[in-house]
Amino acid sequence: MKVTVKEGCISCGLCAEEHPNLFHLNDEGIAEGVGQVPADQEGQARQAAEDCPVGVIRIEE
């Protein structure tokens, strides 16, 4: 599974705060995903996608 953040992030920081192993905020304050998600953190990646207020977290199986 791979996790990315599409254009449109509003820099709320929820994903990086709740799942720091999967997301971080870049120098502009925009969230970025780690790319390949460890198997034991796939549930966290899906939860982050559901919780994103603007729905820009993308999960690729």
Image: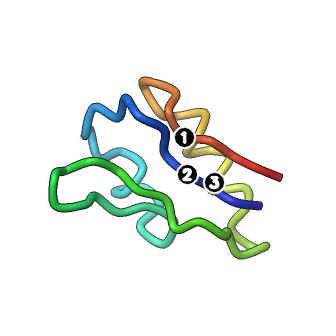
Mark identifier at residue 17: none
x, y percent for residue 34:
52, 68
Q: Can you say whether 11 is above or below 4 in the image?
A: above
The answer to whether the residues at label 2 and label 1 have Cβ atoms under 8 Å apart is yes
Q: Is residue 14 above or below residue 44?
A: above
| Quarter the N terminus occupies | bottom right
Looking at the image, do the residues carrying marks 1 and 3 touch, with CB atoms under 8 Å apart? yes
Please give the residue where the numbered disc 3 appears in the rendered image: 45
- For this view, does 35 lie left or right of residue 6? right
Mark pair 3, 2: CA separation: 10 Å
CB-based contact (under 8 Å), mark 3 and mark 2: no
- From the top left corner, tell me how far across and down residue 39 is, in percent: 79, 73
First in sequence, mark 1 or 3: give its number.
Answer: 3
Q: Residue at x 41, y 34 (%)?
A: 7
First-in-chain label (2 vs 1):
2
Nearer to us in this view, 7 or 15: 7
Q: Residue at x 59, y 66 (%)?
A: 35
Check disc 1: other Cα within 10 Å, few if <14, some if 14-19, many if 20+: many
Which amino acid, mark 1?
A: Ile
**Relative to the observer, which residue lies in front, 8 or 38?**
8
Mark 2 nearby-residue class (10 Å; few <14, some 14–19, many ≥20): many
Residue 54, position as x, y percentages in the image: 43, 24
Give the labeled residue for mark 1. 57
Residue 4: numbered disc: 2
Dot 3 alpha-carbon crowd within 10 angstroms: few under 14, some 14 to 19, many 20 or more: many
Q: Quadrant of residue 43?
A: bottom right
Rounded to the nearest angstrom, the CA distance separating label 1 from label 3 is: 9 Å
